[in-house]
């Protein structure tokens, strides 16, 4: 049920997985760090089986053919432009957009800046950027949770630390909540020359505290109680930054890695969101 795609854009060819009839209602799913489009494999297959056309690309830096060396080439404006370019290449005028982790950050921004292109938004783990910025400033718990961002911006030092001892630190990020075979695949991808630096450039090019305005499209936000990166303060505040129809769903005893750890539940939530809107 899963196809492999190469999506041509002016920036280069994006690798992607896809499922469903080409004429199906389009759904674009954006992965986070340090993963790839295959993080959404269960959801892509489920959506395809229900007649949607689901595509999950390996984003800028993760697709080998779109891996520029300059840190500035990973600015949010470039990441947003990639989403629009991928949609254009697929001949999609409007999409249902989903994102996890920093992929959700891109999805939030696309939905705020280009609501005419987004039928609905599903954000997983990462709260609305303004809610997160406020929590980082006012909530000690969230400030501590976000401390890793400072470390990750230390050029090259972070790469060495993550890849030392057979990428032990990179593997430990997944908290033993993601299947070992999948973790191994992510590690192999990120040990390609320049791949981990490209992935970390997302954080180096985009500073914390960046704010966007309210989102007007129908939005589902999924947060998990065992998420080490995003606490409850920003999660509960997110609804105040959505002016359109909004649904908040909390997953108990699930870690940050929602699309893979709670694959069935996430697929059901996504299908419900699409069926509703």
Image (cartoon, helix red, strand yellow):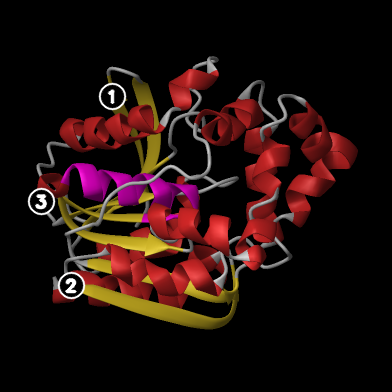
- Give residue 244's position: percent from left, percent from top: 16, 67
- Give residue 256's position: percent from left, percent from top: 58, 65
Question: What quarter of the picture does the N terminus occupy?
Answer: bottom left
- How crowded pointer 1 is (Cα within 10 Å; few <14, some 14-19, many 20+) is rated as some
Residue 65 shows up from this direction: no
Tag 2 or tag 3, which sits nearer the N-term? 3
Labels 1, 3: front one: 1
Residue 129's tag is none
- Residue at 25% x, 77% y is 272
- Residue at 48% x, 48% y is 102
Left or right of 205, for residue 189: right
- Distance from Cα at disc 3 to Cα at disc 2: 27 Å
Q: Which residue is mark 3?
A: 23
Q: Which residue is mark 1?
A: 8
Provide the major secondary structure of the magenta segment: helix
**Residue bounds of the magenta highlight:** 99-114
């Amino acid at each position: 049920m899963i196809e492999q795609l190469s999506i041509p854009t002016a920036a280069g060819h994006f690798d992607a997985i896809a499922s469903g009839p080409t004429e199906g209602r389009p759904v674009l799913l954006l992965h986070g760090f340090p993963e790839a489009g295959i993080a959404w494999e269960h959801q892509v297959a489920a959506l395809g089986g229900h007649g949607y056309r689901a595509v999950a690309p390996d984003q800028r830096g993760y697709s080998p053919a779109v891996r520029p060396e300059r840190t500035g080439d990973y600015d949010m404006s470039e990441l947003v432009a990639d989403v629009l370019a991928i949609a254009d290449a697929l001949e999609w005028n409007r999409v249902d957009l989903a994102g996890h982790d920093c992929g959700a950050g891109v999805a939030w921004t696309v939905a705020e800046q280009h609501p005419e292109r987004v039928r609905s938004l599903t954000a997983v783990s990462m709260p609305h950027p303004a809610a997160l910025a406020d929590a980082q400033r006012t909530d000690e718990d969230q400030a501590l949770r976000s401390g890793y961002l400072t470390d990750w911006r230390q050029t090259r030092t972070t790469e060495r630390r993550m890849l030392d001892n057979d990428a032990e630190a990179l593997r430990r990020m997944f908290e033993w909540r993601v299947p070992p075979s999948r973790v191994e695949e992510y590690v192999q991808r990120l040990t390609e020359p320049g791949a981990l630096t490209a992935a970390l450039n997302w954080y180096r090019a985009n500073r914390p505290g960046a704010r966007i305005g309210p989102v007007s499209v129908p939005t589902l936000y999924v947060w998990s109680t065992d998420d080490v990166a995003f606490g409850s303060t920003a999660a509960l505040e997110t609804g105040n930054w959505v002016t359109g129809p909004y649904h908040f769903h909390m997953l108990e005893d699930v870690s940050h890695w929602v699309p893979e750890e709670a694959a069935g539940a996430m697929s059901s939530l996504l299908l419900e969101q699409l069926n509703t809107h």
